Image (cartoon, rainbow, N blue to C red):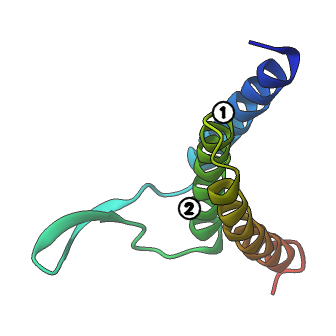
């Protein structure tokens, strides 16, 4: 494992720890039926819950991008980066709404 990989792993781990801290401050998802099947959903549908869901997806995408790069799937990693860019815009939109109380 080289220095860059170690730093990436540390950064991802820190993001996951921070996400868990934020997650612990909001109502958890509840089991609800969707098309007759139980699924977990945030029933309150708050901005904070949307932000947690977006952040969790962003961290998952970062992990996936790292795996794709390690295996030489540069094109697929680039596609994932475009998805992450859109998700990052969503996160910024939600955070600005919270900061400005919109």
Front-most of residues 11 and 70 = 70
Front-most of residues 52 and 90 = 90
Write the residue at 64% across / 73% down. 47
Q: Mark 1 points at which residue?
A: 70
The number of numbered discs placed on residues in the rendered structure image is: 2
Write the residue at 74% across / 31% down. 14
User: In the rendering, at what x and y percent does residue 88 appear?
Assistant: 77, 67
Q: Distance between the residues labelled 2 and 1?
A: 26 Å
Q: Name the residue under label 2.
A: 53
User: In the rendering, at what x and y percent does residue 42 appear?
Assistant: 43, 68
Q: What element carries label 1?
A: helix
Taking the image as shown, residue 67 lies to the left or right of residue 92, namely: left
Q: Say whether marks 2 and 1 touch (CB < 8 Å).
A: no
Taking the image as shown, residue 28 lies to the left or right of residue 93, namely: left
Which is in the foreground here, disc 2 or disc 1? 1
Res 32 quadrant in image: bottom left
Q: What element carries label 2?
A: helix
Q: Quadrant of the C terminus?
A: bottom right
Above or below: residue 68 compared with residue 35 = above
Q: Quadrant of the N terminus?
A: top right
Write the residue at 78% across / 30% down. 8
Res 38 quadrant in image: bottom left
User: In the rendering, at what x and y percent does residue 60 appear?
Assistant: 58, 48
User: In the rendering, at what x and y percent does residue 72 appear?
Assistant: 65, 40
Write the residue at 58% across / 57% down. 57
Above or below: residue 46 compared with residue 13 = below
Mark 2 neighbour density, 10 Å: few (under 14) some (14–19) many (20 or more): some
Q: Earlier in the sequence, mark 2 or mark 1?
A: 2
Mark 1 neighbour density, 10 Å: few (under 14) some (14–19) many (20 or more): few
Front-most of residues 74 and 102 = 74
């Amino acid at each position: 494992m080289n220095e860059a990989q170690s730093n990436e792993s540390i950064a991802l781990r820190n993001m996951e720890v921070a996400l868990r801290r934020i997650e612990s401050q909001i109502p958890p998802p509840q089991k609800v039926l969707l098309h007759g099947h139980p699924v977990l959903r945030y029933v309150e549908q708050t901005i904070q819950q949307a932000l947690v869901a977006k952040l969790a997806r962003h961290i998952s995408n970062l992990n996936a991008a790292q795996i794709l790069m390690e295996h030489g799937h540069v094109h697929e990693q680039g596609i994932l980066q475009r998805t992450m860019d859109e998700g990052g815009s969503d996160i910024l939109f939600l955070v600005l709404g919270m900061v400005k109380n919109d």
